[in-house]
Image (tube, grey):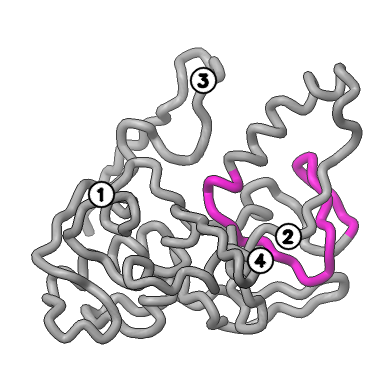
Amino acid sequence: MGELNVPIEDYGLPNGQRSVFFGDRDLNNPGYSTFDLSGTVGYGQADSKALDVWRVEQRLKYLAWPAFGFTSGVILDSGYRLNIPREFAVNGEFGIEEESALRGFYAATHYQYLASSNSNGFEDATSSNARTVSTASGADTNLAWLNAYNAPHWMNVYESFQIPYPAGQSGGMFISGQKNVEAYATSWTRDLLQAWRYSRDSLAQQGLVSGELRINGSGDCAPDAGACRG
């Protein structure tokens, strides 16, 4: 049996110095490269090319965006309820689950407020630009953000900070705030919370904060969640 050597390099500063940047992606190497499309990819787009669909599916999967409005089950335990995100299948077919993942991605990167419903998030990401990936240029599209080095990915923020799921328990300077746990959110949310952790001592010295930060919600993908924000 052969051996596979995989070199692993930390992208932090030498001698344990803290960089002014933080996050779980290298600023110069997010782990993917830019891709182009030959046409529009979307649910019900009869002229979508299979290779284009594969590219969009693979990028959404790499960024861990799940099928919003679906679930792979629920973990019920004493003190908490946690929905398990549904992963769509990367199969070259852009179906309703892929579209829901794309709408969730669009909602996170555009975060448009809808006055008629007094809300923002997944349920408001209903435009054609939210539901498709096209070659069209402009700010109100998905392709540029899918190629961006700082594109948000979906993650379990509780696990990142080692926050216990049961309500009222604490960890990583945070307190789990409710029984129906919203543990998943965007990496941007996680980085904002990390920024708070880095600044907490300084803020406490100025009397601006005290104790741990209570998290009552961050985002979710449950069928009954309504808005899937992050």
Residue 213 counted in the magenta span? no
Judged by depth in the image, the label closer to the viewer, 2 or 3, is: 2
Pointers 3 and 1 in contact (CB under 8 A)?
Answer: no
Tally the numbered discs. 4
Magenta residue span: 168-190
Q: Residues within 10 Å of mark 2 (few under 14, many from 20)?
A: some
Please state which of the two labelled residues, at mark 3 or mark 1, is closer to the viewer.
3
Residue at 31 percent of width and 58 percent of height: 141
Task: Reply above or below: 50 against 32.
Answer: below
User: Is tag 2's residue or tag 3's residue first in the polypeptide sequence?
Assistant: 3
Asked if labels 4 and 3 touch by Cβ distance under 8 angstroms, the answer is no
Residue sitting at 39 percent across and 71 percent down? 127
Tell me which amino acid carries mark 2.
Answer: Gly
Residue 78 screen position, x and y as percent: 86, 74
Q: Which mark is residue 4?
A: 1
Residue occupied by mark 4: 118
Q: What residue sits right under mark 3 in the picture?
A: 19
Q: CA distance from mark 3 to mark 4?
A: 39 Å
Q: Closer to the N terminus: mark 4 or mark 2?
A: 4
Residue found at the very far left of the displayed protein: 38
Q: Earlier in the sequence, mark 3 or mark 1?
A: 1
Amino acid type, residue under disc 3 in the picture:
Ser
Q: CA distance from mark 4 to mark 2?
A: 18 Å
Which comes before the other along the chain, label 1 or label 2?
1
- What label sits on residue 88 in the rendered view? none
Q: Secondary structure at mark 1?
A: loop
Along the line of sight, which residue is nearer the eye, 227 or 192?
227
In the image, residue 98 lies at what x, y percent?
36, 76
Disc number lying in front (1 or 2): 2
Q: Residue drawn 21% across and 52% down? A: 137
N-terminal of the pair, mark 4 or mark 1, is 1
Query: Between 86 and 189, which is closer to the camera in this rendering?
Result: 189
